[in-house]
Image (spheres, rainbow, N blue to C red):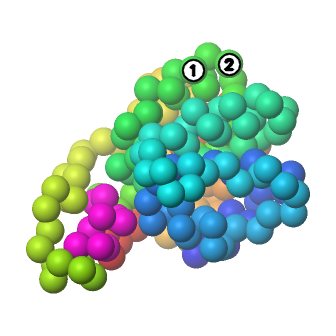
Amino acid sequence: NILMMLNKYKNKNTPVATDVGQHQMWAAQTLDFYYPRRFISSGGLGTMGFGLGAAIGASIATCERSVLVTGDGSFGMSLNELATAVTYRVPLVIVIMNNGVLGMVRQWQTLFYEKHYSATVLNRQTDFAKLAVAFGGDGVCVNSLEELEAAFEKAFSYDGPFVIDCKIDSD
């Protein structure tokens, strides 16, 4: 899985920020942390778009490469901050769990509303990896664990922000 592989690449001191959604829950349950104040999340406050600014701040505050675990919905709310990260060459790995939907809301609609979906399918055509390049950073789109491993190798040695757009199933 994506986050289990991330555990292999981040070090014990790596700050990890999340946005809000399924990816936040997955990160909280899967990632290994060894020191306090290395998991940066808004908790239950529901602040989609929180993560990128938090990851930039964590990297600057700790002088460490930080990681953002986000979804395509949340990332779309603050992706303009990539310009800031590129300007200041912030060492940052952005892992986007791209399932094409607002995952947690859709999950609730599945569980509690008998699959009566409303406003959860994004139908977004954004190529987040190309967007990172357009901002002056770098990035790749991955569709398999083999591609992800190569992406992590590149991302954790890149001098600046690096986007890994992970295509995952909507469910």
| Residue 139 or residue 48, whichever sits in front | 48
Residue under label 1, please give it. 84
Residue furthest to the top in view is 87
Residue 137 image position (x, y, % from top left): 57, 29
**Main SS category, magenta section:** helix
Residue 154 vs 116, above or below: the answer is: above
Residue shown at 71%/54% (left/top)?
39
Q: Residues within 10 Å of mark 1 (few under 14, many from 20)?
A: some
Q: Secondary structure at mark 2?
A: loop
The amino acid marked with disc number 2 is Tyr
Left or right: 66 as drawn, with respect to 49: right
Question: Residue 59, located in which quarter of the rendered image?
Answer: top right
Give me the C-alpha separation between circle 1 and circle 2: 6 Å
| Residue 132 or residue 171, whichever sits in front | 171
Residue 105 on the magenta span: yes
| Residue 83 or residue 32, whichever sits in front | 32
Residue 169 vs 44, above or below: the answer is: below
Residue 138 image position (x, y, % from top left): 56, 35
Left or right: 105 as drawn, with respect to 91: left
The amino acid marked with disc number 1 is Thr
Question: Residue 32, located in which quarter of the rendered image?
Answer: bottom right
Numbered label attached to residue 129: none
Residue 106 on the magenta span: yes
Q: Which part of the image, by quadrant, shows the C terminus?
A: bottom left
Residue 131 vs 34, above or below: the answer is: above
Residue furthest to the front in view is 45
> In this picture, which residue range is highlighted in magenta?
101-109
Do tag 1 and tag 2 residues touch (Cβ < 8 Å)? yes
Q: Which part of the image, by quadrant, shows the N terminus?
A: bottom right
Instruction: Note whether residue 1 is visible.
Output: yes
Residue under label 2, please give it. 88
